């Protein structure tokens, strides 16, 4: 809570300067400060003359309204500042610091906090120092945060994306029947994420992984799926390739594992030259995260196989 208290005091201290420095902030936040500035200008020019003719009680009501309005602005500034800090920590791969920051908002009803908390909780679960029991607990916690985020806001692409990812993760603990059953839901949410934001490369990557997984599904799992479902999920390497290439088109070289999956898909399609190209890119990708390190290791092993 110390960080939250600090952020509140800091937000109040800089509130007056935030309006003058609105260009530091992005999107709706910038519009919010412009609107606040216009409101302040109106009160400055008209407020004094207006208040001179008001009875004392009305003045008190107006003063209370002003305080309420100021509190609302402080809360809006605080949210934006916390989210900016969270996104900065994520970009720097500061997983532990980000987790501690967002845990302060685990009881929030704001989906913007919740999907980010789901994401970083999942990242913590993937750390090499986490034992099996902790990993399972964190995986299910991440899903609960994502589920709550979805309940609060169904129009946010990131909510659908991280709900799908976390749902896939818990399938590892619930058996093949549940995992295959969830696959339809996962694809629906990823398609919704792309509909809401067609410029998000990771959404295309995840759909590529979905297609690749079912394209290479072992025969015994295909039989299980055929018994359980009248129309089991199916896909092809060509469909997977389309999604991985689309991800690169949207944001070139954005993710080591997309490079790796392009190499693996071309290997599965018997295109050695293109497989070598993409696997080499995955091998040379800067390893900042555990996933990058995993991609590097697998790329090196596959390159050895290709000779």
Image (tube, helix red, strand yellow):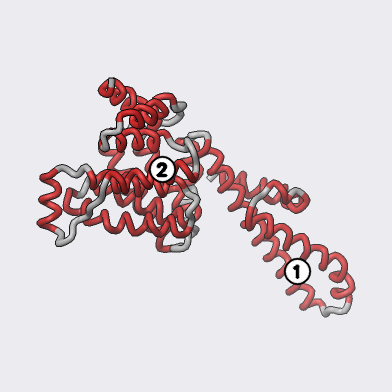
Position above or below: 15 against 155: above
- Residue 135 screen position, x and y as percent: 30, 39
- Residue 201 screen position, x and y as percent: 45, 46
Q: Residue at x 33, y 23 (%)?
A: 300
Q: Is residue 156 visible?
A: yes
- Residue 186 screen position, x and y as percent: 31, 55
Q: How crowded is mark 1: few (under 14 residues within 10 Å), some or many (20 or more)?
A: few
Quarter of the view holding residue 46: bottom right
Q: How many labels does the image show?
A: 2
- Residue 55 screen position, x and y as percent: 83, 80
Relative side of 53 to 200, left or right = right
Q: Which of 10 and 122 is in front in this view?
A: 122
Q: Residue at x 50, y 42 (%)?
A: 251
Mark 2 sits on what residue? 245
Q: How crowded is mark 2: few (under 14 residues within 10 Å), some or many (20 or more)?
A: some
Q: Residue at x 44, y 36 (%)?
A: 255
State the SS at label 1: helix
Q: Residue at x 77, y 78 (%)?
A: 58
Mark 1 sits on what residue? 63
């Amino acid at each position: 809570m110390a960080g939250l208290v600090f952020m509140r005091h800091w937000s109040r201290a800089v509130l007056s300067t935030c309006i003058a420095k609105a260009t530091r902030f992005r999107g709706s936040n910038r519009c919010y400060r412009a609107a606040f500035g216009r409101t302040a200008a109106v009160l400055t020019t008209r407020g004094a003359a207006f208040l001179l003719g008001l009875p004392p009680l009305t003045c008190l009501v107006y003063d209370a309204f002003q305080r309420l309005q100021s509190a609302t602005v402080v809360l809006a500034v605080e949210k934006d500042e916390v989210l900016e800090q969270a996104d900065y920590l994520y970009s720097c791969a500061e997983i532990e610091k980000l987790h501690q920051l967002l845990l302060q908002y685990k009881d929030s009803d704001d989906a913007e906090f919740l999907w980010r908390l789901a994401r970083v909780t999942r990242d913590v679960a993937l750390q090499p120092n986490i034992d099996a029991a902790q990993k399972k607990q964190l995986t299910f916690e991440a899903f609960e945060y994502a589920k709550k985020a979805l309940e609060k806001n169904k129009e946010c692409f990131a909510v659908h994306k991280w709900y799908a990812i976390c749902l896939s993760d818990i399938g590892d603990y619930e058996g093949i029947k549940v995992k295959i059953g969830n696959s339809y839901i996962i694809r629906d949410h990823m398609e919704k994420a792309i509909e809401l934001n067609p410029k998000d490369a990771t959404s295309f990557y995840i759909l590529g992984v979905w297609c690749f997984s079912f394209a290479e599904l072992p025969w015994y799992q295909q039989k299980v799926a055929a018994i359980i479902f009248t129309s089991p999920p199916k896909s092809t390497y060509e469909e997977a390739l389309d999604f991985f290439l689309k991800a690169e088109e949207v944001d070139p070289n954005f993710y080591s594992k997309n490079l790796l999956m392009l190499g693996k898909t071309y290997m599965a399609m018997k295109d050695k030259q293109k497989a070598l190209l993409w696997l080499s890119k995955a091998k040379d990708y800067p390893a900042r995260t555990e996933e990058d390190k995993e991609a590097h290791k697998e790329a090196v092993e596959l390159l050895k196989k290709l000779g």
